[in-house]
Amino acid sequence: MTANAQYRLAARPVGLPKPTDWQYTEEPVAEPGDGQFLVQNQYLSLDPAMRGWMNAGKSYLPPVGIGEVMRAMAVGTVVSSKHHGFAEGDVVQGVFGVQKYAISDGTGVSTVDTSLAPAPVHLGTLGSSGFTAYFGLLDIGKPEPGQTVVVSAAAGAVGSIAGQIAKIKGCRAIGIAGGPEKCELLVSQFGFDAAIDYKAGDLRGQLKQHAPDGVDVFFDNVGGEILEAVLARLARGARVIISGAVSQYNTETGARGPANYMQLLVRRASMTGFVVFDYAARYPEATADLAAWLRDGRITSRETIVDGGITAFPETLLGLFAGKNTGKLILAV
Amino acid sequence: MTANAQYRLAARPVGLPKPTDWQYTEEPVAEPGDGQFLVQNQYLSLDPAMRGWMNAGKSYLPPVGIGEVMRAMAVGTVVSSKHHGFAEGDVVQGVFGVQKYAISDGTGVSTVDTSLAPAPVHLGTLGSSGFTAYFGLLDIGKPEPGQTVVVSAAAGAVGSIAGQIAKIKGCRAIGIAGGPEKCELLVSQFGFDAAIDYKAGDLRGQLKQHAPDGVDVFFDNVGGEILEAVLARLARGARVIISGAVSQYNTETGARGPANYMQLLVRRASMTGFVVFDYAARYPEATADLAAWLRDGRITSRETIVDGGITAFPETLLGLFAGKNTGKLILAV
């Protein structure tokens, strides 16, 4: 008997998830029924959004229930199948959860073309992170050549791609990240025109220096102080893309809204939220563009792969909120 | 010699304007030079935005300088003219300031057609208040027939018109106002489908009752708690129009942003600011529609005209922030 190892949600966290918020379980690997297949997970996608899924209350997805296997995107291999669309040996991607094995009926599952890029890239640049950057920046941000695009969490999976797409579209790209190493990377690896280290202080002064004519598009993954600083420097008609708010997900003192949101009026600007899953029908379009840019070397994809096995999950997730990764954070199972 | 009476800004207010923030001055009425004319003000427009103009710092208009006559829209009569475009006796509208007489070179001044509606209406429904409602609701809000439109400060000059335009466009209109009298007025006079009294408490419960399927368009003049309550009830793809934030203008504890702004992401919604002056080239279009709707009885225009003369200005302005008016607040000079 092969054992499946899993992390289940044990309690709804207050602030950062504690070890006791998780329950590690083992159970026999299930057999796929008719119309199902069994996947052995190889790579788990670790995303800031996971923190939101752990909260009670309505959001764009239902919360993970107490006692349920934690929700996660993953890439794995089909090890047995009673589904006509998926065969043993297929490399697939889907919401397979924080576990070694998953049973699936194929809903939301796609086959991964590893000739395009290695499997982990399909969780990042060619997966929901890249799609988030692509549709958020292009559909919501509508950047025009010559405009100034600012990206927060710019060394992360989404931000690093958003900045590079901005450059491809002829914009000036400014990245905000924490610490000199990430900032160096933004410029040298990801091709941003300038990097702002929010940990170095005087965020508003740095923004003024690098965006003297204002910010036309802000791709925000962070919220909080960073959002306020950029709102204070918007150009007229600016578009603020609300992609995430990682600074707010683990707050214990109550979330904070941008106190200067009336800059939207002063600058005739908009702030728009989106959820990448709404663009599922257009994923092929994004994949085609992103894969071509990768192939042509116009985009650099970076992954931080933690080779810790499933038991490293709780700690690795905390590393995400501490900003330990650059590019996509992935746990090798 | 005729004396001009004026209110000048003496100090930048902290919180609500105090009597000592104003300086009352008298000086001889000036003679118009070549290309100028002299206006005798009859009606001053009192607007929430005036509070913002009193603050230091960049906004969509430069602040009123200390010692300068307070900025105000007004309707008056030309009493002498050396300007080829304006003749003695013309009824005109412009930014004539809080004073009895103003010298103008015609910049931003338009002639008022009193056959269309009485002069005070040209400061409200056929003036910047009506235009704000018209362009904000239609251009930013893009309401569709059958959708639910919520308006805050709905008994005010802008809100009452926004709600009535929403009805004309086939929407369900819900107004938020303070107190049972205003709420009664919303339904009986302005034709809203429902009214919510924010002073009666349980704002969120009332919203849930009257907008069970969510809010498609929110025309916000208020900010603060009311903005948060409506964000919590947005329908998918909702548009939030940031027209003003009167709850925040006199705060002494620092402005407050909507803590739950991430509802924009959850609901795939947008929040967009605008300034009516940007639509100046399209005012004739708005005037034509609004005048036709007034004539056909599809819009009710309401003005609260305070007959106190120029010295009643400081107190009348405070009444605006206390919500004493319904419809447009006007001071008869």
Image: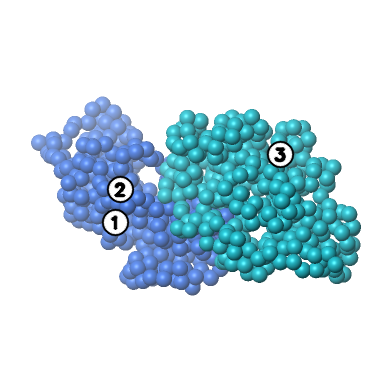
Chain colours: A cyan, B blue
How far apart marks 1 and 2 lie (CA) works out to: 9 Å
Q: Looking at numbered disc 2 in the image, what kind of residue is underneath it?
A: Arg
For disc 1, the chain is: B
Q: Looking at numbered disc 3 in the image, what kind of residue is underneath it?
A: Ser
Relative placement, left or right, of A90 versus A286 is right
Q: Residues within 10 Å of mark 3 (few under 14, many from 20)?
A: many
* Residue linked to disc 2: B51
* Residue linked to disc 3: A301
Farthest residue, direction left: B1
Nearest to N terminus: mark 1 or mark 2: 2
Q: Residues within 10 Å of mark 2 (few under 14, many from 20)?
A: some
Front residue (pair B150, B100): B150
Q: Are marks 1 and 2 in contact (CB under 8 Å)?
A: yes
Report the quarter where the C terminus of chain A lies: bottom right
**SS at mark 2?**
helix
Residue A232 x %, y %: 44, 41
